[in-house]
Amino acid sequence: MNGVRLFSPATISNLSCGFDVLGLCLETIGDYMEITKSKKKGIYITSIIGEKVPYEVKKNVAGVSSEALIDSLNPDFGFEIKIDKKIKPGSGIGSSAASSVGAVVGINHLLGNPFKPEELIPYALEGEKLACGSEHADNVAPAILGGITLVRSTKPIDIIKLPIPKNLKAVIIHPKIEIKTADARKVLDKSIPLEKASQYWANLGAFVSSLYENNYELMKKSIVDNIIEPKRSQLIPMFDSLKQIANDNDSIGCGISGSGPSVFSLANGLKTAKIINNSFKKIYEETGIPFETYVSDINKSGVKILSAF
């Protein structure tokens, strides 16, 4: 086996009530990558199509993640990486995580899988550190492990996979404006009143409970952000209208995906998800802002190896 082709999925992080700790893996959105062995040691990015990201390894999230991985193993050969970048950087649906995760999973596969999936997370976090300035695993963890994940700790890595309620679907609208994670963090308050913080923690606990109970009513009451959303929503055109129309159409919860500008809605069943998706389109068609929408199942397995050669 000299190469692999793979799909590396987009993700929703935070899910309103789990800032920097909750993440959900998407089925229908993601990057495609091809990784092949090279006789020359090191990492080489040889092709990028789609979005514009750097070829220089030290400036590319897939490059720095890959280097961290091979530095720990020191194979006597290198790897060439081709990226079909489908997720726009700064979209809020885990663009940097998808590239970082895809690279380390692909290389690990070509090396005979010396690392378990969760053991690859620290290497993928090197890409997140480059992209956002901090090692938060709320996108990386679901992209590698699939499903819905809770990051209990990154030092050491401690990730909890959570149950996926039956018929849960995700709707995403991506306004084609860029909000960098580092910039979105700057608008957040440096201190939070204890009353607000305790309510936020309560919602996170209730959300986790709703997954185990398959309780959509509890989930709906839990997907509430009284801390981050009031600040970041000001950066997203028509956010309040999107949230209102989602709630009017039986959304389980609607909020900012990651740092935005993408907005997510969760739905019980495909029919409801399609209605919300169409409603999102109608609102944004009136703004003149380019956008994309997606309806997705929850991806239970994370990165998918499509073929080996």
Image: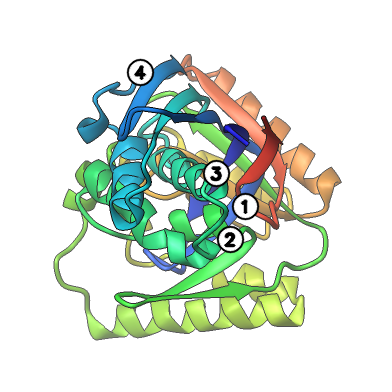
Q: Amino acid at mark 3?
A: Leu
**Residue 103 visible in the snapshot:** yes
Q: Is residue 182 left or right of residue 286?
A: left
Provide the secondary structure element on which disc 3 rests: helix
Camera-side residue: 67 or 177?
A: 67
Q: Is residue 54 left or right of residue 87?
A: left
Marks 2/3: CA distance? Answer: 18 Å
Cβ–Cβ under 8 Å for marks 4 and 3? no
Provide the secondary structure element on which disc 4 rests: loop
Residue in view at x 64 percent, y 68 percent? 220
Marks 3/1: CA distance? Answer: 17 Å
Q: Amino acid at mark 2?
A: Leu
**Above or below — where is 291 with respect to 151?**
above
Q: Nearer the viewer, mark 3 or mark 1?
A: 3
Q: Residues within 10 Å of mark 2 (few under 14, many from 20)?
A: many
Image spot of residue 108 (x, y percent): 50, 50
**Residue 280 visible in the snapshot:** no
Tell which circle, 1 or 4, labels the residue nearer the N-terminal end. 4
- As drawn, the label of residue 145 is 2
Residue in view at x 28 percent, y 59 percent? 135
Q: Amino acid at mark 4?
A: Lys
**Above or below — where is 91 with respect to 124?**
above
Tell which circle, 3 or 1, labels the residue nearer the N-terminal end. 3
- As drawn, the label of residue 52 is 4
